[in-house]
Amino acid sequence: MIKVQQKNFDIGAELAALTRGNHRIGGVASFVGLVRDLAAGDDTAAALQAMTLEHYPAMTEKKLAEIEAEARARWPLEASLIIHRYGRLEPGEQIVLVACASAHRQAAFDACNFLMDWLKTEAPFWKLEETDASEDWVDSRASDDAAAARWQVKPDRAAE
Amino acid sequence: MKVLYFAWLRQRIGVPAEEFDLPGGVKTVDDLVGFLTAKGPGYAKGFAEPQVIRAAVNFEYVPFDHKLSNTDEVAFFPPVTGG
């Protein structure tokens, strides 16, 4: 299931809903991404006031659905969930939740890891960081590309 | 065709989206980037480093040699930073 929303989410309620009624599920792996202040603990840097997530709605829904379908093709999942927020978020707020449920833990862990790696390089979201000093768009990271590449086949290509 | 811009590209160009007929001589995404770059200083600044810009046509990532049609929705944006 894919949810792209401005409002916050309740992790406990979401995970309970994901597994409710399916007794084939033996475990759920989840990842929660939070707004991080890079300047926290650094007196010389301007503190983060907020982060604004912009996205391309029609393409976001399509790419997230493709990424989820690819995970379900690769691992025996009983249920999966991606929630990604957009709009203005403050430090400590939840940005993203990925959860995968399976009979055994390994598939759930691996699929969860895969979903986050692909989401970071494929889903059309952009982060604008706002401090007292400036507003700056976050740069993409080569380490994210490398993390996605270790799963080798691109979801786009695998679907062909 | 519809053309959309996101993140700092949208800020530099000054509009989030625009619609126009496929300009004469524009056959590929690369041709469209050339056409837009000549439209004004904001566009020129936005597309100053075309190698860092990603393109999507009808919600799929495409290379710059992708052929365009007048019914396409084309989006230009910097590398994504979600998650």
Image: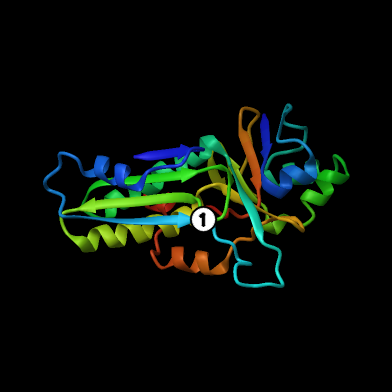
| Quadrant location of the N terminus of chain A in the rendered image | top left
In the image, taking residue A136 as reference, residue B71 lies left or right, namely left
Residue A49 seen in the figure: yes
Residue A69 image offset from top left, x and y in percent: 33, 45
In this rendering, the count of numbered labels is: 1
**Residue in front for this viewpoint, A9 or A70:** A9
**Residue in front for this viewpoint, B73 or A10:** A10
Structural crowding at the residue carrying mark 1, measured as other residues with C-alpha within 10 Å and reported as few (<14), some (14–19) or many (≥20): few
Residue lying furthest right: B41
> Which residue is rendered at x = 61% and y = 52% of the image?
A127
> Which residue is rendered at x = 64% and y = 60% of the image?
A139
Q: Which amino acid, mark 1?
A: Gly
What coloring was used for the rendering? rainbow
For label 1, the SS is loop
In the image, taking residue A144 as reference, residue A10 lies left or right, namely left
Residue A123 image offset from top left, x and y in percent: 50, 48
Disc 1: which chain? A
In the image, taking residue A82 as reference, residue A57 lies left or right, namely right
Residue A160 seen in the figure: no
Read off the residue under disc 1. Answer: A92
Q: Is residue A137 above or below residue B37?
A: below
In the image, taking residue B26 as reference, residue B44 lies left or right, namely right
**Residue in front for this viewpoint, B45 or A99:** A99
**Residue in front for this viewpoint, B42 or A100:** A100
Residue B69 image offset from top left, x and y in percent: 63, 32
The quarter of the displayed image where residue B48 is located: bottom right
Q: Is residue B72 above or below residue A119?
A: above
Residue B64 image offset from top left, x and y in percent: 65, 50
Q: Is residue B71 above or below residue A100?
A: above
Q: Is residue B18 above or below residue B32?
A: above
